[in-house]
Image (cartoon, rainbow, N blue to C red):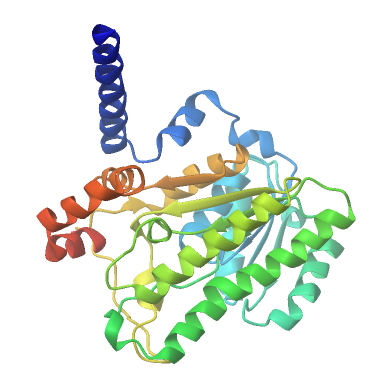
Amino acid sequence: MAFFVYFVTISFFAYHLIRLILWAALDSDVELFVLSKLGKPVSSLRGKVVWITGASSGIGRDLAIALARNGVKLCISARNISELLKVKQACIAQSNGSLGPNDVYVLEMDMLHVNHHNDYFNMVLDHFKTVDVLVNNAGRSQRADWGSINIKVDRELFELDVFAVVNLSRVALDFFVRNSMKGHLVVTSSTAGLIGAPNSGTYTGAKHALHGYFEALRNESPNVNITLFCPGPTATNFLQECFTDTPGAKYNQRVQPTDRRMTSERCGDLYALAIANKTHLSWVGTFPINFLLYIGLYYPNLKRVLLKIVGMERLQRVRDSR
């Protein structure tokens, strides 16, 4: 009996040690890594209609290109029409002839115009007749000390990053239900939606809110697929558009070449893979992001000890990819 207990204990710790090593070495969670080898390829989405909001730059742009490369029909929307047209050309060029001009629909759209979400959705339906996957990617991050944030900033960020996403998703959900479709709702969350990120209090709260909304929907409506995708620090222009602590102000900083961030292209490829395999929750990031996430999610008590050892200054450097 004692030997059996000893064997089980050693096996338990060996299992978690192996998982910890994998988390530290990989640039995605273990499930997504396994799916990259054994799961459905992105090409399984060929011919589907995927609508990506916030597609004019960054992760949205590179997700669109990754999907176009595999013959996926696209609606790409954002406020910047000139950049969207560039993304459209890039998608067609990367599609190896599988997509024509009518297969990539450009939609000028402001997510904050929630009263027009039904109109936007109908415009996509007029063009493609259907929507198979809605990717809620539009949003902005934040850099601000928690105690100095004006409450108006909290409201503005939640309007864009949470309420606009929820409203458009409800429009899509209504379409899926009315047409007896097994639709797919996808949300760009963040590693800040899994553990508290310093210097981004409102943004962290918004991402946690999204997880609450969509996990509740998953329990209510098993007939809709829901994917929450959580990227860590990524090399995009997001810092320029970040909210601060002051209404109307932007952080207006640039990502530095020396920052340790995942490339936007790699993030787009992994995102496309998560969508193809309809994962419930996926996260990606460079070391030590995955290591910290593993500890934070599976060993919360150990996380508190680790944070005391690491200290807030070092954690902040990790947050800023330095």
* Residue depicted at x 60% and y 30%: 40
Left or right of 112 on screen, residue 30? left
Apparent side of residue 37 relative to residue 17 in the rendered image (left or right): right
In the rendered image, the quadrant that contains the C terminus is bottom left
Residue 217 seen from this side: yes
User: Image height check: is 116 above or below 132?
Assistant: below
At x 66% / y 76%, what residue is drawn? 109
**Is 44 rendered above or below residue 294?**
above
Q: Position of residue 53 (x, y in %)?
A: 61, 65
Q: Name the outermost residue toward the right.
A: 179
- In-front residue for pair 49/147: 147
Residue 289 can be seen in this image: no
Q: Position of residue 265 (x, y in %)?
A: 43, 49
* Count of numbered circles in the view: 0
Q: Residue furthest front?
A: 1
Horizontal side, residue 149 vs residue 40: left or right = left
Instruction: State left or right for residue 220 relative to residue 35.
Output: right
Quarter the N terminus occupies: top left
